[in-house]
Amino acid sequence: MKKWIQLLFTLLVLFLLVACGSNDSNQADGADKEDSPSGTLTVYSAFNEDHALAAVNKFQEETGINVDMVRLSAGEILAKVRAEKDNPQADIWFGGPADTFEAAKTEDLLHSYHSEVAEDISEEYKDSEGDWTGIYVGAIGFATNQHFLDENGLEAPTSWDDLLDPAYSNEIVMAHPSSSGTAYTALYSTLRAKGGDEEGFAYLEELHPQVQQYTTSGSAPGRMVGLNEVGAGILFAHDIIKFQQEGFDDIVLSFPEEGTGYEIGAVAIIEGAPNEDLAQEFVDWAAGTSAQEVGHEANSFQSLTHPDATPPEGTPDLEEINLIDSDPKEAGERRQEILDRWDNEVNN
């Protein structure tokens, strides 16, 4: 009888131990679930689609956070965020020139966040109030088609004035500055390069008849040059190099010697973001080296802002380009004024 009592007692102890272990396991699982990210982050991205997809996939892989990504031009994102101000539909604005972010900031469309990861990034590449963080830099360049140059006895343009040559009549393509952050950067750069608004707009009036069309996408002119559809395009140098690497061997890259403008590409949290905590994680990630080095996978050639991030081979050396002293804050605050004048005096 005693043996049976001992056996029952042993079985009871084992049962209690298993039950407690199971309970501890469930609690641990519950803690993991509570600590793990939940929800879906919505990202509006102005990167080229292949870069945007590569970045989003890497972010999901490294953080476990789900992402819905919508690819738009920077100007389109600004218009969309503006339209959704009272009922924000997205959490993150990812990519595009900082002057467009500055325009959004003046309308209280961005949510301030100082990322600890971004502390290593130079102050010149960040908004002092934390509304946006710079993650790459790109300079405006000229893309010309070698066949076009040969047929017209021309060298690749090295001045803004070279584009006024009669050979370029109806042969230049650039994006529309209202829809494209690239084109607005080029527009603002021209005003700076020419010494002021009056001189700049006088030049733009001369350039306008040379332009065959204004595209929605900032990078589209490069592809058109590569396909020999036009003689020249005005766009970011990193996009020109991307087309060259993709096999458009007839594209020639050059820069205006009197100076060219540049963008500070940024990331920001949209004011009223439905998933603010997840959005902060995205900004932290975007400011770090892993995110900034996605260009190696996506064949993108922007210069990078994090000092420990390494850009892909072939990225333009900004030290060798005459960059105009640019002010994203002024460019953003004056954006609508400059666009309105361009529409009224140039594109009419």
Image: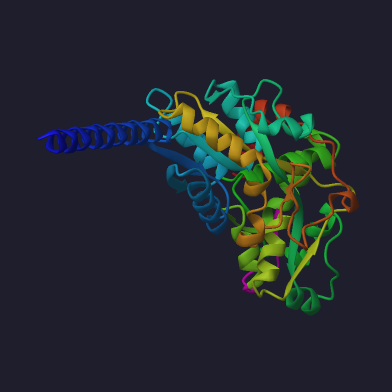
Colour convention of the picture: rainbow
- Pick the residue in front: 199 or 41: 41
Q: In which quarter of the image is the N terminus?
A: top left
Q: Which residue is drawn at 43% across and 38% down?
A: 41
Q: Which residue is drawn at 54% across and 52% down?
A: 58
Residue 205 appears left or right of 100? right
Residue 14: % across, % down: 25, 37
Which residue is situated farthest in the left direction here? 1
Residue 284 appears left or right of 244? left
Q: Reply yes or no: does residue 233 show up in magenta.
A: yes
Residue 112 appears left or right of 279? right
Q: Which residue is drawn at 79% across and 73% down?
A: 149
- Pick the residue in front: 75 or 40: 40
Q: Which residue is drawn at 59% across and 40% down?
A: 285
Q: Reply yes or no: does residue 12 show up in magenta.
A: no
Residue 276: % across, % down: 47, 27
Any part of residue 178 in sight: no
- Give the magenta range: 227-235
Above or below, 236 against 171 in this view is above
- Pick the residue in front: 293 or 104: 293
- Pick the residue in front: 9 or 347: 9
Above or below, 142 against 20 in this view is below
Q: In which quarter of the image is residue 48?
A: bottom right
Tally the numbered discs: 0
Any part of residue 55 in sight: yes
Above or below, 137 against 326 in this view is below
Residue 7: % across, % down: 17, 38
Q: In which quarter of the image is residue 261?
A: top right
Q: Quadrant of the C terminus?
A: top right
Above or below, 292 against 36 in this view is below
